[in-house]
Amino acid sequence: MNQHTENQPSATPDFLPIMGTDYIQLYVSNALQTAHFYQTAFGFQPLAKAGLETGNQAEASYVLQQDKIRLVITSPLQADSDIGRHIDVHGDGVRVIALWVEDAQKAWEETTARGAKSFLEPQQLQDESGVVIRSGIHTYGDTVHVFIERKNYQGVFLPGYEAWQPQYQPAAVGLKYIDHIVGNVGWNEMNTWVKFYAEVMGFSQLVSFDDEDISTDYTALMSKVMSNGNGRIKFPINEPAEGKKKSQIEEYLDFYNGSGVQHIAVATDDIVGTVQALVSRGIEFLQVPGSYYDDLQNRVGNIEEDLEQLRELGILVDRDDEGYLLQIFTKPVTPRPTLFFEIIQRKGARSFGKGNFKALFEAIEREQSKRGTL
């Protein structure tokens, strides 16, 4: 299977044009405290909120923004709610990947006609700032895609939200946009969801990795990367592969109780400055051995960054035919070892750091060993 090809652009029209990621919504047990964490540690700025003060008796949400990235942090206000049940099963985690589209009605019609299970039939939300149309479909596990059409809306976020302007507004750390969002799925489910994104949403396979590419002495996984027509949305899909010990994907599936979003990769134009800022605010990153850097320049060629700074911070480097990239991964940001973040800076490279897989997954295994889950 060890063959990795990049699909050529399709000559057929894109039936589901997506302009970008609109927001990512996390269901958490305490939205106020979690929002404070993302402000303090990751430099997100307060944008909007909804809850009892805005007439919402069911849930409280805080919207945070940094450049083109929006996070919506949501908790239930009542017992025995769908949000509460999601948290009971999965812990804190991603529920909604919202996609910005020109026509939410058409997006729903096109995807459900191709076999998607409807999550939200097209609906209009309206206030004095205009109209938003949204719709949605189910994907892997309990994760959903919501299509957001906001061309006729000028409000702060969505109807039902008000501006949130607290005095506490820590500085941003240089995060720019969402580069990709990675989903973990169960045994032998990867190709099912690859087919879903291809047939239901019109995505193409950008690249694939098998257990020969992504393996250590103990664990392995397989992955395929799906991308929409304009390349703004990239969804790697991971599944476990047979190994001597429990892989990170198996650990995730055990603690998340099923498929879900494993990590969110966010881009920066200055990874050294961004990581230095994050470390100073308490974010912990996976660390690779210092020996990783001993032959780095032989493996990746000349780079602009200072090698000693990269070594000190634990930033990884990889190169493809179009340039190189720098990346680093946080430890889980939730009590369960599930959701984490990747910080990535691309200098021409369009790949995903294949050359770093072994060092990265050995670092993850060291953390698994500490947790007693390897």
Image: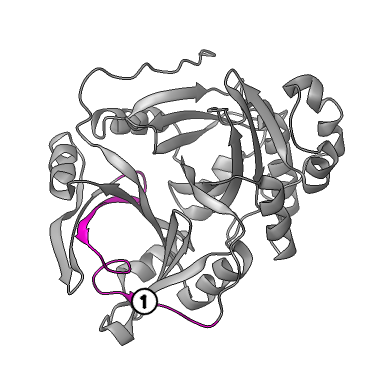
* Neighbour tally class for label 1: few under 14, some 14-19, many 20 plus, Cα within 10 Å: some
Task: Read off the magenta span.
Answer: 139-167
At 71% across and 65% down in the image, what residue appears? 282
Give the colour scheme of this rendering: one colour
| Residue bearing mark 1 | 163
At 60% across and 59% down in the image, what residue appears? 333
Q: Is residue 117 visible?
A: yes
Image quarter of residue 243: top right
Q: Is residue 285 visible?
A: no
Label 1 SS: strand
So how many labels did they put on this image?
A: 1
At 76% across and 21% down in the image, what residue appears? 299
**Residue placed furthest toward the bottom:** 53
Task: Give yes or no for residue 154 being in the magenta stretch.
Answer: yes
Q: Tell me if 332 is positioned left or right of 166 in this view.
A: right
Q: Give residue 103's position: percent from left, percent from top.
A: 17, 46
